[in-house]
Image: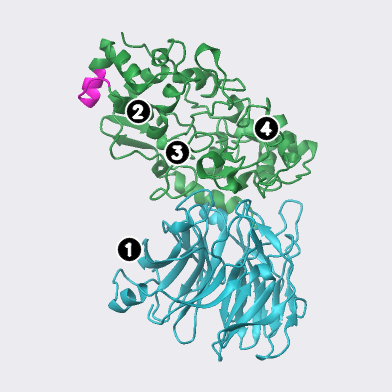
Amino acid sequence: MRSIGRSFLLVVLALFPRVASAQGDFEWHVPAGLEEQRVRIPKDNPMTQGKVDLGKQLFFDPRLSRDNTISCASCHDPRHGWSNGQRFATGVRGQVGGRSAPTIINAGYLNGGIVKFTKQLQFWDGRAVELEGQALGPIQNPIEMDMTLPEVVSRLNGIEGYRSQFQQVFGTDVTSEGMEKAIAAFERTVLSGDAPFDRLKAGDESALSEAARRGMSVFFNKAHCSACHTGGNFADGGFHNVGIGMDQDEPDPGRYSQTKLQGDFGSFKTPTLREIARTAPYMHDGRLGTLEEVIDFYDKGGIPNPQLDEEMRLLKLTGQEKADLVIFLQEGLSSASYPDTMPPTLPE
Amino acid sequence: MFRLPLTATVIFALSIVSATQAGEIVLDGLKNPSGIAVQPETGVVFVSDSAAGRIVRLVEGSAEEVITGSSGDTYGKGPKYTIGPMGLAFLAENRLVVADSGFPDGEEYLRVFEVPPAGAAALGYDDCTKVGPLAATDSVKAEGNFYAVAATEAALYVTCNGDDTKGWISKSDITGASFGELARFIASKEATEVDAPVAITISPRGELVVGQMGEITVPSDGLLTFYNARDGKLLYNQPTGLHDITALAYSPRGHLYALDFAWNDPSQGGLFRLDNDGEGGVNAVKIKSLDKPTAMAFGSEGALYITLIGSVEEGQEVGAGQLLRLKPGL
């Protein structure tokens, strides 16, 4: 069997040419380990510093919700790995959803597929296309932020600080289209890479501890994690049924709700593993609180059901292999340059 | 520098004429047919009637059984397909290679049959020389679901769908009438970061040409790749925009064609010509819409034979499969 050394070399070669990108007056750094061309920017929504700043304010502003209590950042909090640290997403009036809040780290990164052809699907069930298609969904969801677009546009147009910024960025008063573009532009900047794993691939033999290196070998071989958690963002862009929730009376249909293909029943989008140590609890319903529980779940082959992914099987990992795998996930995929964004001053 | 052995983006008048033909159904009632090979010398077309667990040949417009008795396995999670033997390739006039997909991973073989003359009794499924299997090791999953086979004088190559972390193309060296151990040869997923090698053929220059199907839940991720057949080195890797490539074949005129199954939206599937886009990439030109195409081969007269699974209601008995013939000229 070939070692992963060859693929390492290919990735190393791919890493060096890319460090920074500029568009308009906006400059950003695409971290090592991520392919710059996979952070796609729609032609009709170019990045500008003013737009990213505006999107950041909108992202952190609870005035986008019915009772002024919930912002995007309430469920996608940088202090909790851009998730919320809870099992489920909680919206206005304390309403609790049925799925966990996925991290938005690298949400603008195309996982799997072909840059030229493939659209990035958002949400656990892939019901939205690209970040622009996702950005306004939670604002209108009655158990999340519970606003209509006319209501939120009207409210924001009453805030002079927003109206003037929209004029500067888009040449209009506040519009839902502008909100969508600004929020998406900000979300596109939330990137994580340049982790010890990436530095090892780039040739730094001291980047990972011995235990983490053993865990990396388990990850790419015996544990079959890389069947789905693949590529620069450790996610294949696909949807898989690992059995979570399939033991309930009425399982969440997941991707099936969009495609109506029986094979998609109970399938959910493969999440990134970047910064996984910060994003607990895990799985689409947040039922597993620790990485140890997650690995035990996979070691047992998931929960049997007719649509269980073919990669799910009894792994028979030893205790040492499980421990090493946890160390690899925690140590290897956590970046010193984690995007620990502080909330901005909101406009008045 | 690798030069792509595809024709330039010049569309010949004859190709356009061929592209508009409806095609002739030469066999129907097949059950998930998934492989085609054309017998050297005779030009007789052999088809793997996969869910029926048999290999048939086209004789005077009818299917004649040549090999029978493969067990079946289930592929997919809904829609689900019963599959048995899949890929086919001739090594000599009567020496036919059949790729197993009807057994559990780790228990599947490449089977080499000496096919009897037309009219003779069918062979049993074990009346063959077996090459393989590829068993599990402590760190590598057992291999199976052998999709498609390609052969040179020196080796057999088969695309595998057992270990999704690596996406193996396996190889057995040929020495005279003997076959070497079936061994994992190219980790195509490591080479391309895309899942599932499925289609395989040999280029006019002798390279391995592989269609990487990709993740079936991810649209448009199909790749066209070329490898050195001797050392497995990746020579070329380009996106095609196709969803789920199931077969590749060079026409007598040197054009490369691909079949796209388009798992998530079969209405987008069909026969495509893969042209050089003039910039080193691939331009996939749709020639004909087809209902779940699985395999193809050019006949000795230049006609193109294609197997189609066709459509039946979920849960109904299979049997909508067809063998389609497109006239020479592609």
Q: Which residue is mark 4?
A: A327
Tell me the tag on residue B301. none
Is disc 4 placed on a helix, strand or loop?
Answer: helix
Chief SS of the magenta region:
helix
Labels 1 and 4 share a subunit:
no
- Chain coloured green: which letter? A
What span is colored magenta in the figure?
A: A165-174
Mark 3 or 2: the one toward you:
2
Q: Which residue is mark 2?
A: A180
- Chain coloured cyan: which letter? B
| Occupied quadrant, residue A154 | top left
Q: Which of the image's four quarters has the N terminus of chain B?
A: bottom left
A164 and B185: which is toward the camera: A164
Mark 3–mark 2 Cα distance, whole angstroms, equals 17 Å
Q: Which residue is mark 3?
A: A109
Is disc 3 placed on a helix, strand or loop?
Answer: loop
- Circle 2 packing at 10 Å, graded few (<14), some (14-19), many (20+), is many
Is disc 1 placed on a helix, strand or loop?
Answer: loop
For mark 3, name the chain: A
Q: Which residue is mark 1?
A: B277
- Percent x, y of residue B130: 74, 75
Figure check: A272 above or below B87: above
